[in-house]
Image (tube, coloured by chain):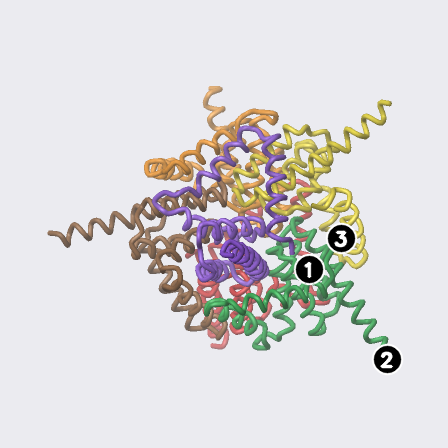
Chain colours: A yellow, B orange, C brown, D red, E purple, F green
Amino acid sequence: MRSYEEFAREREEQNRLVLESADRVTKRFFSLDALTYRDGALPAATKELLGLVASLVLRCDDCVAYHLGRCRDLGHTGEEVSEALGVAMVVGGSITIPHVRRAVALWGELTEKASELEEREER
Amino acid sequence: MRSYEEFAREREEQNRLVLESADRVTKRFFSLDALTYRDGALPAATKELLGLVASLVLRCDDCVAYHLGRCRDLGHTGEEVSEALGVAMVVGGSITIPHVRRAVALWGELTEKASELEEREER
Amino acid sequence: MRSYEEFAREREEQNRLVLESADRVTKRFFSLDALTYRDGALPAATKELLGLVASLVLRCDDCVAYHLGRCRDLGHTGEEVSEALGVAMVVGGSITIPHVRRAVALWGELTEKASELEEREER
Amino acid sequence: MRSYEEFAREREEQNRLVLESADRVTKRFFSLDALTYRDGALPAATKELLGLVASLVLRCDDCVAYHLGRCRDLGHTGEEVSEALGVAMVVGGSITIPHVRRAVALWGELTEKASELEEREER
Amino acid sequence: MRSYEEFAREREEQNRLVLESADRVTKRFFSLDALTYRDGALPAATKELLGLVASLVLRCDDCVAYHLGRCRDLGHTGEEVSEALGVAMVVGGSITIPHVRRAVALWGELTEKASELEEREER
Amino acid sequence: MRSYEEFAREREEQNRLVLESADRVTKRFFSLDALTYRDGALPAATKELLGLVASLVLRCDDCVAYHLGRCRDLGHTGEEVSEALGVAMVVGGSITIPHVRRAVALWGELTEKASELEEREER
């Protein structure tokens, strides 16, 4: 399985390529996509859970990876992420299980790295 | 468009039919489905939003109707539901728009009825 | 809910329309579709269950109705159909439940009609 | 089957409802959606065929109805629409057939009306 | 393409991770998933074909790999698997072809290994 | 990301495997698939754009890669391909973005190679 960092680097490089050659439709869609997850009546943290569940039932590993990173950045606990994945798995069925497996492995990687960083800072 | 009440009545009747003839797999799946939306690390109200967004990106009108009813029962405002539908629409694309249209119409129906009831009670 | 007979009549009328204006691609696809469900290494009856499950996880009510009709014609019992629907529901998730509900209601209609016919013949 | 006019009227009414309560995300998405189908490197007529095929493989009857109306307005012939539906059917499989059936019936309705109007104008 | 063994090992490791951190919903879903494919009115072997076809039309390579392994364990012949893949391909369309390609390559790998083992045992 | 050439080679090898063991259904489906993209009322070049958009909204990287190769062979410009991807992205939503990213990267690879070849020929 690709690491989160490999995913994030490839994503950034390819996004640059897309935006270099992008027409108006693509540019507007990318900026709309960013706008969608800002704080509003619902906090940004809740919207990231919505994005995570939507990505999982539609079974897009890259989208799941992206929203997991955002969920960690916005402070969601493992229990919260776990329950969100549970909703997605029940709605989307056993066909989502391979994606749940990869999501759990990636979450482990994301939070391990986070706790290593915290340990270092504490020293 | 079918009203919420027609949907709810047909759903109840057909669920009874399903459970009458259900084997173990079906019975367990129905009870698991109920368990999924209970309060936990995430409040039930948030889980209903997750169910709503999952249902909308997978484009199931009946599932959307069900979760809209639950979102209203659990106290979500129109702005919150609107933003959740917005996340689903951006993730799922313009193919979700007909379902967003029906969701907005149904939400109008659900909240109109609610405010009529409140008015009556106030008298 | 539309009855099986209404479905079957509309299907037949619209198929006629399609084939009247069909080009080679469409004609060949329709004849390939018929070929797919013939007896082979797997009996036709098993293939209809495969078609039923595929239709249910892809959530197409018309396709489900068609394969339910064929499953009855080829002698599948309610228990067999029920278990096939169970596999589909677990693979496809709770998003399939509204389609399972309609499938169970339709199967009831199909087998009621069948047992009425048998009763009449027995007299 | 609902007529094209019923579809168009309901679509217009519900779009009004959506835009009345719409937040920024929804408004921008609707305006982006309109922008997407304008003449560019590809003519608008080709883009409508792309929208039609995308709608058919994603199996959204309302979206198919909308793009069929636009295809007629922009001058596509029945043969062109038929071949586009053929591509969609082969890519998307027999699960699309019920939608192809409804698309063909609707196209018949749309072009019948058009030829009646032309006849009247010729008199 | 990943070998069947690599898939099976990764699947096992990740399943362990999932179950370590799993809440009740996830645990019950995993045990329900196992229950679904047991002998009943339909034999387990038929249910695996149903799972295979469902996985292929929903286009999940990992799920297809898993059910192919089970189909071999339960004694399905290449002709039977081939016909099941054919049903899935016709229902799901040409978009399934890359998955059919990988399924056929994997089946070759699974049965080659099986015949090597048999040869050794015969000596 | 896999290069176009690796994709094309694996595709060819696996197609050979599929056709070696193929029954009538599979053989006919493959030949129908080829027939679908021939010149007709719509030129082959337009049909490849239809295939590209259908593949992108259904999110199949291999199918997208194949149709991108064909779009280049049939003379589509980067602007035309870009607009077709834009239609697909708006219809299919942000869930298609990872596939759009890979499509743009692959198109870059395909056209770089083409311009290198042209340069060599000009010398």
* Distance of label 1 from label 3 (alpha carbons): 12 Å
Q: Residues within 10 Å of mark 2 (few under 14, many from 20)?
A: few
Q: Residue at x 51, y 57 (%)?
A: E123
Q: Residue at x 71, y 64 (%)?
A: F81
Q: Amino acid at mark 1?
A: Leu
| SS under mark 1 | helix
Residue B72, given in percent of the width and then of the height, sits at 53, 30
Identity of the residue furthest to the front in this view? E123
Toward the viewer: A96 or C9? A96
**Residues behind callouts 1 and 3 on a single chain:** no
Residue matched to label 1: F85
Q: Amino acid at mark 3?
A: Lys
* Distance of label 3 from label 2 (alpha carbons): 36 Å
**Residues behind callouts 3 and 2 on a single chain:** no
Q: Is residue C51 left or right of residue D27?
A: left
Q: Nearer the viewer, mark 1 or mark 3?
A: 1
Residue E109 visible to an observer of this rendering = yes
Residue D12, given in percent of the width and then of the height, sits at 55, 51
* Distance of label 1 from label 2 (alpha carbons): 32 Å
Toward the viewer: D113 or C84? C84
Q: Please tell me the numbered disc located at residue A27.
A: 3
| SS under mark 3 | helix
Q: Residue at x 72, y 36 (%)?
A: A109
Q: Please tell me the numbered disc located at residue F122.
A: 2
